[in-house]
Amino acid sequence: MFEQQPIRHGLAALALGITASTALAGPTLDAIKQRGTLVCGVHTGLTGFSAPDKTGKYAGIDVDYCKALAAAILGNPDKVKYVPLTAQQRFTALQSGEIDILSRNTTWNSKRDTTMGSVFPGVWFFDGQAFVINSRKNPKVKKLADLDKASVCVETGTTTERNMADYARAHKLSFKPVVFEGQEATEKAFQSGRCDAYTTDASGIAAMLVNLPSRADYTVLPEIISKEPLAPMLRRNDQEFFAIARWMIFALQQAEESGVTQANVLQMKATSKDPAVQRLTGATAEVGKGLGLDSDWAVRAIQAVGNYGESWERNIKPLGLTRGMNSLWNKGGLMYPMPLD
Amino acid sequence: MGRQVPGASLPTAMWSSEHFRNLLYQIALLVLIGTLGTYAVLNLVHNLESRAITIGFSYLAQEAGFDISEKLIDYQPTHSYGRAFAVGLLNTLFVSLLAIVAASVLGLAIGIARLSPNWLLRKLAAAYVEAVRNVPLILQLLLWYGVLTELLPPVADALRIGPAYLSQRGCAMPWPVAHPGWSAALLGLLLALVLSLLWARRARTVRDRCGRAPPVLWPAIGVCLLLPLAAWGAFGAPLEFSQPVLSGFDFEGGKIVLPEFIALLCGLSIYTAAFIAEIVRGGILAVDRGQIDAAEALGLSYGQRLRLVILPQTLRVMIPPLTSQYLNLSKNSSLAVAIGYPDLVSVSNTTLNQTGQAIEAIGLMMAVYLALSLAISGLMNWYNHRVRLVER
């Protein structure tokens, strides 16, 4: 896996160089329909976001998003080909056309939105960078300032390396980064005691801890040092697909807001007098038509994965995280679906 | 040369010239390759532009913003990506150079041991070669790193070995505090080495002329000891060492060698030494049996035979395959990323991800490894040439 890394990038670079301009990423939607599958780049194994479940199938909130898209576009949530990617590989995979969409806890920032040929349709999960320590080995560490001069394990290819350096500089602290390729190697080095702390998104830390038998030994420090709006990522110049990806986020959140669930979606479509529900389920307004889909697009997506809140409860709640910023706007959170009309 | 057809017109005559046709084919091939290359580059630029991906190396001047754990030159997160790249490159060069020296010494010893008259030594050396050579390097690196980080005690209960401490965090040892005296001593040592070499050369001319060489070894050792000592003394004989002291999370002061570095150095040198041992063995076996018989007949001991007769002759057989092992080693050092050592690849990967300049970063990495390999290869070829000249 490690050895293939540069080769993989090299090949992707080569592919960009040699493939004729027909590979130009305009009609991703046509390609998906023609192929009959959605190729979705996901995490190699991050519990709650995308990790193989007991039956060996990918599950998680990032996976649910891909399933919802496949259900809306292709009529079947199982018509997804998952491509597991490391942090390192993900952007080249998207740029070179290996995947249709990257749904892999990726932070939305200006550089990625402007210089890398990619765009973000909307935030799928609000997160922030946190630090975890072994409180049995370092009982005195209660806050981040106590970690001055500590060794910190960090995964390469993420925004975390830079956030950590920024925070250290701003707060006159110094951390010794030990940088690994791949999340497993980073976590293993931290657990072995090579580093005093491990830093990544708070959700990533929760996902690691939930799988650790000795999780009682670990403490997550209170400071959240960055904003990490995790979002799906698409290639540019692809307006049709972009619109579907964006409105899928809003549709699933609107479903939660309107009380439309996996269980009651068909019944709501038939009986609800709420205009918002009628538009969402395609009973009245033709939202689907504007997206180049049929009117049942959102119904199929909700049938496949439930509304945003259901997906959250199923995937993220078991990690022990609270909804917080990820609650709907009318519940004190930041999730504000634009109106379907 | 082509056959001349009498009375043929000029173009026909040209076409029938083999030389002319060969030239034409070669030009055609060059044009074809050039066209394909240009097409690939133009197409790449077009594809990147149409996908709104920024192209160019201007990112090298931007602030890197990430820190690096091991650096041979001053580096802060506020420095540029270009400087971060240089830090990674120096780390790669440093670990490759040390590993090449260690692998050569170890490989030579094991190669000789494989042909030793001592049964046990011979078998042990054979077992080493077979075991090490046949296990993938990446596994060996992970093994070494695992041994260092999982089996060694935490930093609070570090093993004390003389003045040094060994723990999960690597090896902390005393280190001289920077002082002009130490630099002077280092310069003195370099000067002494040059003087010794010059003296050895002079001794050889004297031997060729008078048949008897003046002593070389002892004067050389003497000057190598005395000159640095004198320089060190002349600058006030600094005796201040910075001692590693456990404070907080880690040792402070002294010199701390990271476990990533130790694991990489061990892994690379032990792995490559197995291959070098086989090259040494092959080289020794390639020396004509008659040479050894003659040396024995002259009454030379085993050590003398090895040093004076066998090894000088094996060199010329060994150099070409040795070159490719050195090349392998320097390229294999890129596996460092698996065990968290900030080599060229590791730093470039971080750069690549922060900037998104995949093609530029990969291209730069490839260019550096190519240049490094060509440099090693050029150096070894030069040495090979020299060894050849000595051949009689």
Image (cartoon, coloured by chain):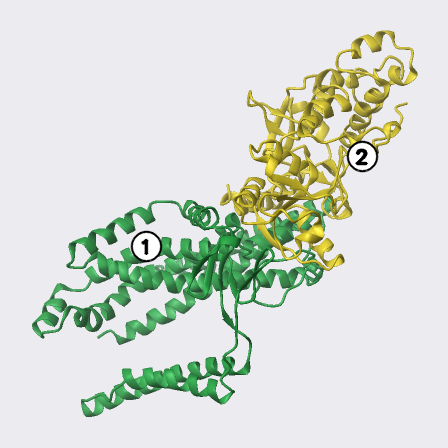
Mark 1: secondary structure: helix
Of all residues, the one furthest to the left in this rendering is B297
Residue B350, percent from left and from top: 62, 51
Vertical arrangement, residue A289 with respect to residue A325, above or below:
above
Q: CA distance from mark 2 to mark 1?
A: 58 Å
- The amino acid on which the numbered mark 2 sits, given as a three-letter code, is Met
Colour of chain B as rendered: green
Residue carrying label 1 = B275
Given residues B9 and A326, the one toward you in this image is A326
Looking at the rendered structure, the kind of residue marked 1 is Phe
Which residue appears at 84% of the width and 7% of the height? Answer: A270
Mark 2 lies on residue: A325
Label 1 packing within 10 angstroms: few (<14), some (14-19), many (20+): many
The answer to whether B227 appears left or right of A174 in the picture is left
* Location of residue A109 by image quarter: top right
Q: Is residue B11 left or right of residue B295?
A: right
Q: Which chain is yellow?
A: A
In terms of secondary structure, where does tag 2 sit? helix
Between A10 and A128, the residue placed more toward the observer is A128
